[in-house]
Image (tube, coloured by chain):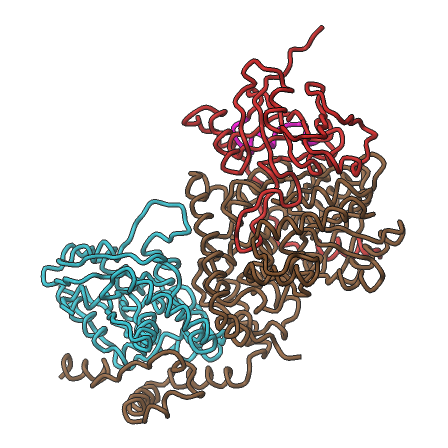
Chain colours: A cyan, B brown, C red
Amino acid sequence: MKVGLFIPCYVDAFFPEVGIATLELLEKLGIEVVYPLNQTCCGQPMANAGSQKDAAGVEALFVKNFCDFEFIVTPSGSCAHHVREHLNAIPDTPEVQKVRRHTYELVEFLHDIVKAGEFPWAEFPHKVGLHNTCTTLRKLRTAKASEIDEPFFSKPLDLLRKVRGVQFVEPSRPDECCGFGGTFSVFEEPVSAKMGYDKVQDHHRAGAEYIVSADMSCLMHQKGCAERLGLDIRFIHIAQILNGSRA
Amino acid sequence: MRPINHAEASSHFIEAKEHLEFHDRRLWDLRLKRDRQAHGIPEWEELRNLASTIKEHTLSHLADYLEQFETQAKTNGAHVHWARDASEHNEIVYGILSGRSAKTLVKSKSMLTEECDMRPYLETRGIKIIETDLGERIQQLDAEPPSHIVVPAVHKLRDDVSEVFTRTIEAQPGNNDPHYLAEVMRRNTRPYFLNAEAGMTGANFAIAETGSFVVCTNEGNADLSANVPKLHIACIGIEKIIPKFEHLAVFIRMLSRSALGSPITQYTSHFRAPRPGTELHIVLVDNGRSQRLGMKDFWYSLKCIRCGACMNTCPVYRRSGGLSYGATYSGPIGIIIDPAFDIRKYSNLPYASTLNGSCTNVCPVKINIHEQIYKWRQIMVERNQLPLVKKEAIRIIGKVMSEPQLYRAAISATGLAIEHLPRFAIYNWLNPWGKQREVPDVPKQSFRSWYLENRTR
Amino acid sequence: MTSRDTILAAVRANQPTPTPGIPTIPLFERPPPRSLLDDFRDALVSMGGKFVPSLDGKPLDSLLKSLFPDGQVVCSATPEARGTRVIDRSTEPAALADVDVGVVRAAFGVAETGSVWLSEEELTTNALAYLAQHLLVLLDPEQIVGNLHQAYHDPRFKTARYAVLVTGPSATADIEGVLVHGAQGVRSLTVAMVPLPAVSC
């Protein structure tokens, strides 16, 4: 199996270890991973701000880089969702439709496509709070959302349960938004910061040593809040735990 | 006029720590109560589908159902008036009142009358209006609009209410016991119920089959307003129509469960015809609804049954308060309705959202709220409603991201800047991110450099 | 063109593509885990109402005295109770302002919510249910339906001028979320399970 790896801009710039962990993990599972060198961004920041015009160039570049892959995988729920549902600043050609259909967020990919059974190299003996991001939860539906009346399910939990040593703690508001929201974090800074503070303090009170998530963007915001608060709590992407990071 | 600045209003709201903490906790509690009720009914999601289907069907045949409603209501002995907009609504109401020399009006909660700005219009023409819903009355006495459509004074603490009542209706200063304050209100309002010449209600639902309309309250104030005076005026938005009585069950089962987490309101009142010797006037109001009906991406917002569940679940609403939206309708539903009234005034509202989607999940009539918020942002850009700074920032990012070389240069530059600039140069008024958060650390190399070194030859 | 015509024309022009008809709404009847009466009682009590399971063979007036020892002005809209204040179809609402206890017989109850159904038939003067300080409602336990779907099939909704589903006493939590009974309407609501009197020929 061969996948095209898409690494979001902020992971490329600030959290390369997440990209590295994603790549190494996929390779450990016997998958050939290709990283198109001319990738940049999926277009989400511009599209979420409402500007289709400014997103068009970026989206076209994304399609150009990834149109030859049967599987496009990214360690970012929000990017995967954008590509699948919102890549409409450009005409919806068969090429674009193919890219949209074949784009997966990492957890969905591991759970639904690879059906990864075990991670024998992984061990993470820490108390962990799972942050299901709003995109993976309510749009990609990788876990049950608390508002909906349906049986419980959680793809990230299914994967993390296969890792030795992980102890889960749950905050009082497990799926309340953390307040990142992309440009919201800058244009509505007061509420964004308050939401981030509330989120990290909630996990901290529950005893979490680490907050783990499938989206580094949310974690970047939460980390910024926790550091400013001086809170003793660390942040890690699910790819890193599954890949065998010990801390 | 300047657009409403939600972010600025929210920063003031957040500064009042005790108020913020109560507001957030109280509304989250209503959300949890809602969950308990919803999860206690195995057919909850089926009810949501039915409610949405009923509303979509009705709205797509609205003219016929409106005509049916009018015919039935008139047969029942009610007068039916039609108001194209807010001013016509106010004129009609004034015409009815002055025609009968009515000088005092007791009214129950109606967002529609807020939307039409009815009170000042009538007051300047010599009509005394008494809001009888406790939350609405608190706000009326404090000369402040309601902040939440179901719990209008949720942003106030008991001390605030005590202060208002001491100032306006002779409550004992310093007595902030909610039971005492509610009793003061009860005694103050009762004479108005008994002596008012006219009573006004809104309506939660209007039934085409029978010409009836339904009002749901917990206090019984709508029933008093309607059943004591000899004149009852009901103001109803045209989108409130549903076809038949049997459809009502679906909505009544979900309304209070969604709003307050109780199976039903204490009073669910069905009005079909006037009491003998009295008059019933129904005012059907358009005020932009027919226009919204024609908006391909936004007409679903007309399904709204005004439960407020979206506000209770919205993490932004809970931390900024309804007044920060500057409109009768606030929170998620407000964001998708208000720009249709005034696109410039409310141009910022679609950005007062993280697009987290919780609102859509709790909406009993399955309005795709967060998707409409996303679409409104596109309209704002198309209609050039974005402030210049925002517009430019997005344009520049779009340009940088669409060219690999520019992108790579920007990443290096940002990295260098963060690594080498002194703290004061990074954390200042130019950098909103850094006001209450640390910026990320800069790694030794980007992912791309690592990949080039470790996976390519 | 009148406003009516303008509005209807605008609505017709803007109506979205008609969606298909509405399916029949199921009754969502479920065999209750316990009896309808138990469900009704639990729902009523959770909404702040009081439940009297039976008269225990005693006359209604003695229940009234035991529930409302201080009740000075008792106004009954049902012939089953003797009040101190007469009410008939000519009674003006405001004349009921000093009533301490109102007594009515509900047409039916709803187990799902603990509600009782009243109309001008049962109330004589509608305002009785709101101006009285307390309300005692008689309900025949055989007249309890399971849920609101069943309730809304009752034909009396289509003939009553005014019909209300009353659930517990008047309430508000508008001040700091603190629950208060007796907001504007009755301070207490008691439902007494009293079978309909036998009809004498």
The C terminus of chain B - image quarter: bottom left
Question: Residue C130: in sight, yes or no?
Answer: yes
Residue stretch in magenta: C145-159
- Asked whether, in this view, residue B108 is left or right of residue C19, the answer is right
**Res B336 seen here:** no
Measured as percent of width and height from the top left, residue B47 is found at: 50, 42
Q: In this view, does C94 lie above or below A62?
A: above
Residue C101 occupies quadrant: top right
The residue drawn where x is 86% and y is 55% is B95
Closest to the observer, B99 or B298: B99
Depth check, front residue: B13 or A243: B13
Nearer to us in this view, A97 or A135: A135
Q: In which quarter of the image is residue B407?
A: bottom left
Q: Residue furthest left?
A: A121
Looking at the rendered structure, the number of numbered marks drawn on it comes to 0
- The x, y position of residue A86, in whole percent, is 43, 67
In the displayed structure, B209 sits above or below A77; it is above
* Relative to A236, B72 lies left or right: right
Residue C10: x %, y % from top left: 73, 57
Asked if residue B46 lies in the magenta stretch, the reply is: no
On screen, B404 above or below C20? below
In the picture as drawn, the residue positioned furthest to the top comes out as: C201
Q: Which of the two residues, B378 or B356, is positioned nearer the viewer here?
A: B356
Residue at 70 percent across and 61 percent down: it is B168
Residue at 60% across, 71% down: B346
Residue B341 placement, left or right of B334: right
Whole-percent x, y for residue B315 in the image: 45, 63
Q: Which residue is drawn at 56% across and 18% down?
A: C55
Please identify the quadrant where the N terminus of chain B is shown.
Answer: bottom right
The relative height of residue A41 versus residue B330 in the rendered view (above or below) is below
